[in-house]
Amino acid sequence: MTAVLDRRQEQSERRREHIAELNKRAAESDLRLKRLYDAIEAGVADIGDPALKDRIDGLKAMRDQARADAERAQALLENFGGKAVTPQMLRKFAETAHQRIRVDGGGYPRASVDGR
């Protein structure tokens, strides 16, 4: 059970790191968009430039996708990763382990019984 709990914890940590990276990506895209808007307002960039419009659209899409991915990952973490191990989960684990260890005749393999 310790290994199972450790894996769950590692998965939760990886998901949190992934969410942080997605949020960082969204924030960076926002910052880039702000700089572009500032350049347009200052007259440095031409709003009619098709390349500028494509860049703005690309940054918006990147930002929106990162936010949506972060929200989905956060929901998964809250719904599945954050659940505590319950007595029912332990019972199911024990039942499954018991079924997988038993041999067809109803006993246990010799290696399981005497440790060989």
Image (spheres, helix red, strand yellow):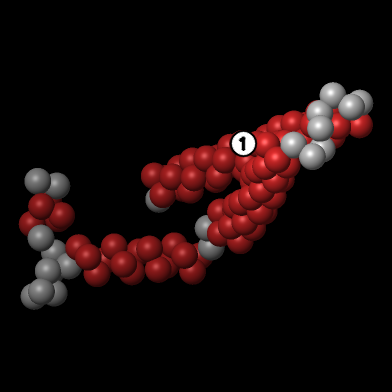
Give the structural element (helix, strand or loop) at label 1: helix
Residue plotted at (74% across, 31% down)? 32
Residue plotted at (58% across, 57% down)? 76
The spot of residue 59 in percent (x, y) is 69, 40
**Residue 59, can we see it?**
no
Badge 1: residue crowd in 10 Å (few <14, some 14–19, many ≥20): some
The spot of residue 19 in percent (x, y) is 62, 43
Which amino acid, by three-letter code, is at mark 1? Glu
**Residue 6, can we see it?**
yes
Depicted 36 relative to depicted 50: above or below:
above
Instruction: State which quadrant residue 104 falls in.
Output: bottom left
Closer to us: 87 or 3:
3
The spot of residue 22 in percent (x, y) is 63, 41
Residue on which disc 1 sits? 21
Closer to us: 51 or 72:
51
Q: Judge left or right: residue 26 versus residue 45.
A: left
Residue plotted at (15% across, 55% down)? 112
Residue at the bottom extreme, as displayed: 105
Depicted 5 relative to depicted 84: above or below:
above
Instruction: State which quadrant residue 40 falls in.
Output: top right
Instruction: State which quadrant residue 55 falls in.
Output: top right
Closer to us: 78 or 38:
38
Q: Judge left or right: residue 48 versus residue 69.
A: right
Q: How many marks?
A: 1
Depicted 99 relative to depicted 58: above or below:
below
The spot of residue 4 in percent (x, y) is 41, 49
